[in-house]
Amino acid sequence: MTRQIRHAAVFCLLLLVALLANAVRVQGVQAGQLDKHPGNGRPTVARFGQPRGDILVGASAITGSRDTRQRLRYERVYPQGPLYAPVTGYLSQTYGSTDLENAEDGVLSGADPRLAGSLLDGGASHDQGRGGRVVTTLKQSMQRAAYAGLAGRRGAVVAVEPSSGRILALVSSPSYDPGVLSGTGTGVKDAWTRLNSAATQPMLNRALRQSYPPGSTFKIVTAAAALQAGVVKDVEAPTRIASPYRLPGTRTDLPNEAAGCGNASLEYAITWSCNTVMAGLGVKVGLTGMLDTVEKFGFNDRDLRVPSPVEKSNFDRHMSPDELALSSIGQFDTTATPLQMAMVSAAVANGGVLRYPHLVDRTTTPGGGTLSRAPDRTYARVMSPATARRLRHMMIDVVRSGTGGRAAIDDVSVGGKTGTAQHGVDNAGLPYAWFIAWARAEDAASPAVAVAVVVEDAEADRADITGGGVAAPIARSVMEAALRDTGR
């Protein structure tokens, strides 16, 4: 009998060891795998079990949290949803997150280790796990001016502070209300289907993740390359480039929209947007020289983050001379995001130094203590101060006496460049209207803002589009808002 009891005890001990081993395996070895298993709903319940930290413009929150009293308790709300949608993105209990909601999720959700215990808030333990705040670089007045200027037309506006890289306005149009995607259920699924199937693509972030042929706005980049390479030493001297210009190795002649482009100077070519001069200069600079300059501006950068990801702006690394000629006037395979073209304008405005663009000024604890602040970074020294100065003078001429007159602001130095980008089969589509610009108050040491505007559905006659009639007034209203904010 004693032996049987002893065997039973050993057997029970073995069972206990097996249970303990299994517990270690499940809770230790397999914990991470099980935590990520699609069938495990606990992380989702925990994620939405408390209010999320807010995204701010200045001192005002542009997001919020609504208590639903459901299993997934708190839903994200966006009081001014369409105005800031390309900045915030969406946070959905069904479809995940995008843009700042995604890029700054650790801070907003409270998962960032720096928020543990909220020691920076004075050790208030009740704050543990609460989401922090993300303070953007945006200016509300400029955001509203850009949004109103596009007025629902397909396009985008980006405004940057040249001296710092702070993004002051970022608008994509048409927009959408991210709040309709926040929760679960058939209503959310119906909204998702409707938004994704819309011909106007309201969920496409055109400011950051849509690249377009930049058209004649790219001529500022080509002019910078020509000056940096020494191909042009005197901007007022004839360039000895004929009009029309025969594309190298072909029988195709490149024409001009403007008159007087034959043997024109670089200054005249920028002011009146001569295709022939700029195409010829691009060929003279050569592919290596062009690549050196365009990549300093940010083209071909696949890793640009603001911190939301940015679509690569393209300038081919392998081209024939005729392709290079077309690429040098913003056609062929050359594409750019609106952010990229704002960076071009900002580099010129800032004396040739391109600051790294960023959308987040700082992140904070729930109580406002600083967690992190955007670093002061230079993206590249794109060109010499002398080259930047010459480009600024030429861009001022575009506004004073050339194609960009509708961007002029009284008692303010405004430099700009119009662009008309062809697209579609045989260029049959309505051209995209571009305008890039910068503005400096007369008593200011440096420009307050650099802007890029693109309008896709430019339903105006071609002369009006080429003359800056569509995009330039939008840029002017954004620059005026910037100058009001800085007191000129």
Image: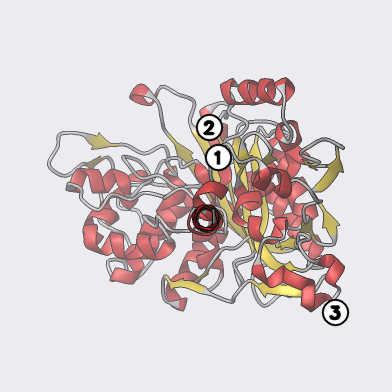
Residue at the spot of label 1: 467
* Distance between the alpha carbons at the discs numbered 1 and 3: 58 Å
* Distance between the alpha carbons at the discs numbered 3 and 2: 62 Å
Mark 1–mark 3 contact, CB under 8 Å? no
In the image, residue 140 above or below residue 153: below
The structure residue drawn at horizontal position 57% and vertical position 60%, both measured from the top left corner, is 396
Mark 3–mark 2 contact, CB under 8 Å? no
Q: Position of residue 143 (x, y in %)?
A: 74, 50
Mark 2–mark 1 contact, CB under 8 Å? yes
* Distance between the alpha carbons at the discs numbered 2 and 1: 6 Å
Q: Residues within 10 Å of mark 2 (few under 14, many from 20)?
A: few
Residue at the spot of label 2: 463
Q: Residue furthest left?
A: 249
Which of these two is toward me, 263 or 393?
393
Q: Position of residue 73 (x, y in %)?
A: 81, 41
Quadrant of the image occupied by residue 95 = top right
* Disc nearest the viewer among 1 and 3: 3
SS state under label 3: loop
Quadrant of the rendering where the C terminus is positioned:
bottom right
Q: Residues within 10 Å of mark 1 (few under 14, many from 20)?
A: many
Which of these two is toward me, 22 or 385?
22
- Amino acid marked by disc 1: Gly
Residue at the spot of label 3: 122
